[in-house]
Image (cartoon, rainbow, N blue to C red):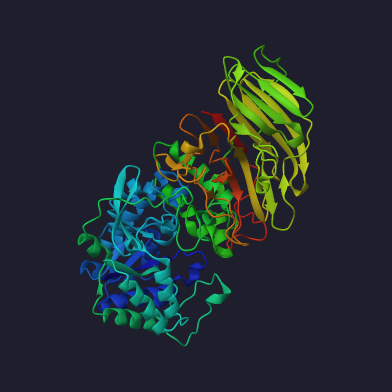
């Protein structure tokens, strides 16, 4: 069995203060080089930013690493200039990140790596062509999350080289493994006995395969603690690096084991014919370790991931309009898009971040308020009201709103030869499902807020609407004001664009997205289950790549597949995953028709979520956009370092396709 180890070095680690970086190099990074000098072929993965920072603080370390690379005693595993969550960013930014990282590697080390560790192990198939374009021939990705959703995989594949497919291309694949590296860490930290670790390792070897990831994780956790959790305390009288060396010596002494570098294993491998798909409908963006480490921790939790990501998107879209962008400007954007700013970032570094953003905060958004007029409705646009129900009829389609429920959409559909077709989305009334678990009304076009310390809030309140015609946009505009608890006064506008079969829902009210400790989801789209074929039901969006990523929601043995991205993982972690929506939309439909849900990333960079499950002979299927979730990185109080929410435009569109 070939065994390999990759130490992940990251001086941008969220909870490491800048003044402690020299300590980390001395206590953590030099011991790794000494292990390599002793004859252990260990790989090192780091960002270009970390390498530059080491060069500034301790150039001797960089010189020694370069010497060991030249002598082929170690290997550089690539990362990019910074760690960033590529499935949440546009592909152009990921390309810049990988290319800039390669330039730093070549300048300071004289090499360009061919094996890359996926940043934070957050993967989507759209990344495959981006890494290949940057010159990589193999990725390292965590086994645990993808394998959980692929029970058809042979468990021995974790101990063998594979291929992974994405967007019509394939690339080599080596595994990291959360269980394996956690066992190694626990033994080094004295949490488990050497005998227990040896029993575990023996079991892995007996299970067969060609190669095993021995250690594929942080280099800053031995003889040092980054300081995220109280339980990270350590016994300073014990050198953990001595324990690490003894573990490597023990493994090297086993007859059935050979130490290899990742590229050596790749070079000696005949790849399997079939490439794997790591993503699934349940987990479109697999991430490292346990389910609590899902993509939402960098999207809509943290100190204020929502605003920070929105600012990054706004910044990127400004750069994208320029004919030339300097490397320094790309560098600034990449540093702000770094994943380390979105988890356990220290107060000092967070305050410094605030000083990097003035240009972004000054960007202007379109006017929130719709252009309105008192023009008369065209003859072919008929608006009627019967009690709380507002009916809008046009030659192409129709829409029905409920004024008793905050202008929630009761029905939205097409018309053919003057006749209404079945509504595609809207409200599923209480009593539709013969299952008490679904004994409620399920609306469309509303939001739900679940603060941790108070009752659920929605905009499903009784309103007195105003109905107007806007000639410029050829839209019927139904608007109303409402007052919702601590959110204050909110203005909601539902604009039915009659030419395009599109409804545009807009909110004006800073209190809606102002910080709160809990969950906030909006842009709710509830499918009419009688209008869509469950045998071809799907959802699709972009997750950091250039192509749409499609996922089937059909199931051979039941009505539909069970998918619930918004399901809580635990009391502390409010959801399990999400969709990057990096082109600003997601699709939900079947082989004949679809609904497009659009939320501009530069207006508010939320994440999509799908909830689909069978309900007896029928099914329930809904999409929503989360603006805030909760996990252990979330803060208990507002933080205004990166600005208030006055310039966030909260709107979305539903298009019938």
Horizontal and vertical percent position of residue 346: 56, 65
User: Left or right of 325: which side holds 68?
Assistant: left
Quarter of image, res 637:
bottom right
Q: Nearer the viewer, residue 400 or 627?
A: 400
Image quarter (top left, top right, bottom left or bottom right) of the N terminus: bottom left
Outermost residue, top direction? Answer: 379
Residue 238 appears in the figure: yes
- Measured from the top left, where is residue 226 in percent x and y? 50, 71
Residue 209: where, in percent of width, then height? 28, 66
Q: Nearer the viewer, residue 328 or 314?
A: 314
Residues 184 and 102: in front is: 184
Q: Please tell me which residue is depicted at 43% across the width and 72% down the height of the picture.
A: 182
Q: Residue at x 31, y 73 (%)?
A: 206
**Residue 219 visible in the snapshot:** no
Residue 156 in the image, given as x and y percentages of width and height? 33, 64
Can you tell which quarter of the image residue 246 is in? bottom left
């Amino acid at each position: 069995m070939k065994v390999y180890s990759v130490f992940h070095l990251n001086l941008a680690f969220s909870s490491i203060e800048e003044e402690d970086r020299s300590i980390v190099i001395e206590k953590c990074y030099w011991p790794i080089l000494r292990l390599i000098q002793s004859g252990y072929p260990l790989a090192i993965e780091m960002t270009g930013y970390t390498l530059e920072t080491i060069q500034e603080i301790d150039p001797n370390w960089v010189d020694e690493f370069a010497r060991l690379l030249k002598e082929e005693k170690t290997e550089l595993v690539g990362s990019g200039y910074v760690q960033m969550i590529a499935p949440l960013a546009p592909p152009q930014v990921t390309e810049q990140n990988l290319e800039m990282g390669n330039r730093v590697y070549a300048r300071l080390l004289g090499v360009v790596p061919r094996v890359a560790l996926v940043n934070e192990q957050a993967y989507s198939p759209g990344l495959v062509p981006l890494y290949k374009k940057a010159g990589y021939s193999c990725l390292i990705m965590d086994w645990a999350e993808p394998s959980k959703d692929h029970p058809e995989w042979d468990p021995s594949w974790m101990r063998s080289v594979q291929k992974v497919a994405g967007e019509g291309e394939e690339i080599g694949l080596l595994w990291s493994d959360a269980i394996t590296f956690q066992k190694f860490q626990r033994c080094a930290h004295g949490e488990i006995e050497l005998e227990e670790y040896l029993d575990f390792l023996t079991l892995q070897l007996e299970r067969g395969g060609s190669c095993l990831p021995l250690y594929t994780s942080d280099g800053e956790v031995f003889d040092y603690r980054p300081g995220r959790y109280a339980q990270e305390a350590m016994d300073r009288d014990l050198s953990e690096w001595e324990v690490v060396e003894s573990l490597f010596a023990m493994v090297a002494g086993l007859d059935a084991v050979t130490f290899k570098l990742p590229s050596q294993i790749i070079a000696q491998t005949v790849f399997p014919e079939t490439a794997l798909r790591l993503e699934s409908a349940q987990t479109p963006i697999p991430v490292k370790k346990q389910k609590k480490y899902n993509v939402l921790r960098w999207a809509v939790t943290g100190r204020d991931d929502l605003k920070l990501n929105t600012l990054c998107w706004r910044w990127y879209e400004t750069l994208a309009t320029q004919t030339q962008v300097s490397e320094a400007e790309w560098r600034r954007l990449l540093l702000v898009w770094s994943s380390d700013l979105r988890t356990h970032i220290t107060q000092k570094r967070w305050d410094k971040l605030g000083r990097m953003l003035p240009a972004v905060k000054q960007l202007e958004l379109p006017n929130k308020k719709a252009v309105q007029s008192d023009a008369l409705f065209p003859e072919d646009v008929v608006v009627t009201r019967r009690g709380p129900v507002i009916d809008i009829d046009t030659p192409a389609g129709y829409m029905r709103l409920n004024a008793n429920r905050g202008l929630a959409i009761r029905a939205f559909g097409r018309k053919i030869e003057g006749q209404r077709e079945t509504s595609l989305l809207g409200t599923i009334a209480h009593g539709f499902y013969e299952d008490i678990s679904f004994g409620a009304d399920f609306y469309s076009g509303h939001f739900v807020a679940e603060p941790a310390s108070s009752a659920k809030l929605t905009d499903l309140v009784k309103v007195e609407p105003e109905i107007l015609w806007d000639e410029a946009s050829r839209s019927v505009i139904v608007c109303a004001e409402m007052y919702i608890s601590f959110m204050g006064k909110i203005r909601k506008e539902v604009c039915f664009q009659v030419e395009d079969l599109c409804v545009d829902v807009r909110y004006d009210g800073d209190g809606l997205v102002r910080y709160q400790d809990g969950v906030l989801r909006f842009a709710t789209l509830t499918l009419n289950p009688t209008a869509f074929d469950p045998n071809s039901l799907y959802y699709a969006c972009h997750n950091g790549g250039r192509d749409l990523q499609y996922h089937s929601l059909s199931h051979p043995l039941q009505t539909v597949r069970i998918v619930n991205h918004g399901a809580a993982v635990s009391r502390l972690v409010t959801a399990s995953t999400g969709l990057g929506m990096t082109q600003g939309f997601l699709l939900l439909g079947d082989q004949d028709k679809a609904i497009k849900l659009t939320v501009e990333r530069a207006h508010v960079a939320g994440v999509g979520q799908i909830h689909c499950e069978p309900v007896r002979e029928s099914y329930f299927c809904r999409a929503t956009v989360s603006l805030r979730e909760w996990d252990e990185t979330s803060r208990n109080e507002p933080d205004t370092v990166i600005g208030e929410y006055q310039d966030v435009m909260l709107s979305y569109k539903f298009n019938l396709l």
